[in-house]
Amino acid sequence: MAHDPHADSQALARYMEETNSEFKPWLLVQLRLKKLQERKSEISVDEYITQLNDIQQDLMVLGEWWVGQEAEVFGTDSGSQH
């Protein structure tokens, strides 16, 4: 299954489970963003911004997590990646 940026959070969660990707941090960030997007109309602007800032902070930490792990995560043949 190719990742569809318009899929809902349940479809993304199902994809993560089917591919044993539940603990891949970059997908967890995507799932959090998708869930926040789905709840946007149900929460206040301040709460939305607070949660978005929290996700952004986690994403910044994730940037540091990647350093030195690219080959392990994506394999040594970078030509096969998109």
Image: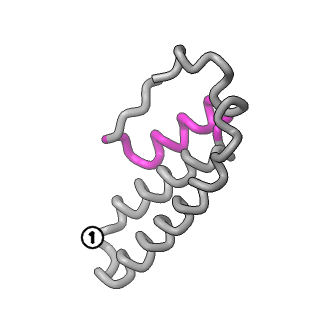
The residue shown at (54%, 34%) is: 15
Q: Is residue 79 above or below residue 69?
A: above
Q: Position of residue 12 (x, y in %)?
A: 48, 41
- Left or right: 6 in relation to 33: left
Residue 71 image position (x, y, % from top left): 68, 29
Q: Secondary structure at mark 1?
A: helix
Q: Residues within 10 Å of mark 1 (few under 14, many from 20)?
A: few
What residue is at 43 percent from the left and 25 percent from the top? 2
Q: Which residue is mark 1?
A: 41
Residue in front for this viewpoint, 17 or 23: 23
> Quadrant location of residue 22?
top right
Q: Nearer the viewer, residue 8 or 51?
A: 51
- Colour pattern of the rendering: one colour
Q: Which residues are magenta?
A: 6-21
Quadrant position of the C terminus in the picture = top left
Image mark count: 1
Which residue is depicted at the point 41% across and 70% down? 52
Does the segment drawn in magenta span residue 29? no
Quarter of the figure with residue 45:
bottom left
Please report the residue visible at 38 percent of the width from the left and 46 percent of the height from the top: 8
Q: Pinpoint residue 17: horizontal percent, then vertical percent.
A: 63, 37
Which secondary structure is most common in the magenta stretch?
Answer: helix
Q: Residue furthest front?
A: 68
Compared with 47, 5 (above or below) is: above
Picture coordinates of residue 18, whole percent (x, y): 61, 30
Vertical placement of residue 77 versus 57, above or below: above
* 57 sits left or right of 44 in the view: right
Q: In the rendered image, which quarter is residue 49 located in?
A: bottom left
Asked if residue 16 is among those painted magenta in the image, a careful observer would answer yes
Between 43 and 21, the residue placed more toward the observer is 21
Residue 79 vs 44, above or below: the answer is above
Disc 1 residue type (three-letter): Ser
